[in-house]
Amino acid sequence: MKTLSNRTRRVGENIRALISKHLLLKEHHILELETSIVTVTEVQPSSDLRHARVYISCVGKNENKVIEALNSYASLFSKLVAKELKTKFSPKLSFHIDYSFEQGLKIDNLINNKNG
């Protein structure tokens, strides 16, 4: 994973906050999100800020269905972010499953089994 500049990191955090706000307020009825708890864990914008990968963790329904639903609404979220984010370009969003928690649990289990 490449290192993000401070500006890119700040823009990513702002995008994460905006997407989280719109998901929390449930301004747009997305059926697949009704029975799931969705968390935006990280946003990684490209260096030119034209694209951004949004990592999602969810509890409830099948994660793949949630990601498919969010990707189908990606242009809507891009427009919502563009209205509130003051940058030259509005990033095109793509949603992905965040596996970092699962990987952390696997590593933790390996360490505990090694020591135990």
Image: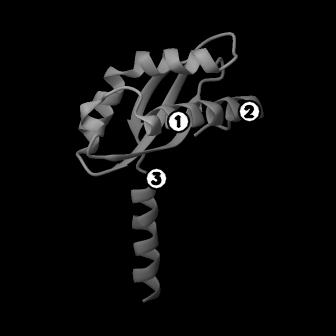
Say which amino acid is labelled 2: Ser
Q: Is residue 45 left or right of residue 87?
A: left
- Tags 3 and 2 touching, CB below 8 Å: no
Describe the colour scheme in one phrase: one colour
Question: Spatial distance from mark 3 to mark 2, Cα to Cα?
Answer: 21 Å
Q: Residue at x 67, y 38 (%)?
A: 3
Question: Is disc 1 placed on a helix, strand or loop?
Answer: helix
User: Would you say residue 50 is visible in this rendering?
Assistant: no
What amino acid is at disc 3? Ser
Please give the label number shown on residue 100. 3
* Nearest to N terminus: mark 1 or mark 3: 1
Find numbered disc 3 in the image and state the secondary structure of the residue it sits on: helix
Task: Name which quarter of the figure residue 64 lies in.
Answer: top left
The residue identified by callout 1 is 21
Give the amino acid at mark 1: Lys
Tell me if residue 53 comes above or below residue 74 in the rendering. below
The numbered dot on residue 115 is: none
Is residue 54 in view from this perspective?
yes
Mark nearest the camera among 1 and 3 is 1
Q: Which residue is mark 2?
A: 5
